[in-house]
Image (cartoon, rainbow, N blue to C red):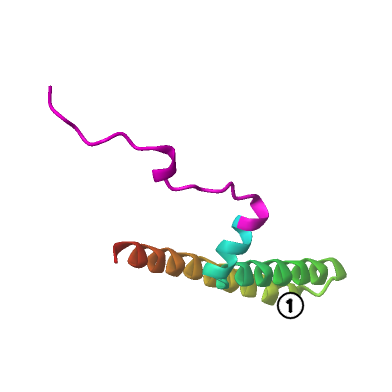
């Protein structure tokens, strides 16, 4: 019989606490605050554009839809940037 490593005791194992939705949201927001900011900007610009469209201001509505695309692009770049930073941290 070969002697293997001694069995792990429950006290040797790391303890992880359950993380709720609110805790996870706050942690992720602290890690990459630009993503929620981009989401809020996107929703704000979209809302303003829809209000302008409903009021009949077609020119302003078009400007807001273009601004929405820019805000979505910013959010996407922030998301990718956060993923790259997280990957670089995990390599170290």
Q: Please identify the residue farthest to the top as the structure is shown.
A: 1
**Total count of labels:** 1
Instruction: Please give the name of the residue rendered at 73% of the width and 71% of the height, measured from the top-left corner.
Output: 44
Q: Is residue 8 left or right of residue 22?
A: left
Quadrant where the N terminus sits is top left
Q: Which residues are magenta?
A: 1-23
The quarter holding residue 80 reads bottom left
Query: Which residue has dot 1 on it?
Result: 59
Q: Residue at x 43, y 48 (%)?
A: 14
Residue 16 placement (x, y as % from top left): 51, 48
Q: Is residue 17 in the magenta section?
A: yes
Question: Element under label 1?
Answer: helix
Looking at the image, which is closer to me, 60 or 8?
8
Q: Residues within 10 Å of mark 1 (few under 14, many from 20)?
A: few
In the rendered image, the quadrant that contains the C terminus is bottom left
**Is residue 62 placed above or below 5 in the rendered structure?**
below
x and y, in percent, of residue 30 in the image: 57, 69
Depicted 55 relative to depicted 1: above or below: below
Which of the two residues, 71 or 9, is positioned nearer the viewer here?
Answer: 9
Q: Which residue corresponds to the image point at 61% horizontal and 71% vertical from the top-left?
A: 38
Residue 50 picture location, percent across and down: 78, 66
Does 35 lie within the magenta span? no
Hey, which quadrant is residue 13 in on the image? top left
**Horizontal relation, residue 10 to residue 33: left or right:** left
Q: Main secondary structure of the magenta part?
A: loop
Depth check: give the residue in front, 91 or 84. 91
Specify the farthest residue to the right: 55
């Amino acid at each position: 019989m070969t002697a293997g490593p001694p069995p792990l005791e429950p006290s040797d194992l790391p303890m992880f606490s359950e993380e709720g939705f609110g805790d996870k949201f706050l942690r992720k927001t602290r890690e990459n605050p630009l993503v929620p900011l981009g989401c809020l900007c996107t929703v704000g610009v979209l809302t303003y554009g829809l209000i302008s469209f409903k009021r009949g201001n077609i020119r302003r509505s078009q400007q807001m839809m273009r601004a929405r695309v820019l805000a979505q692009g910013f959010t996407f770049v922030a998301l990718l940037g956060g993923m790259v930073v997280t990957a670089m941290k995990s390599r170290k």
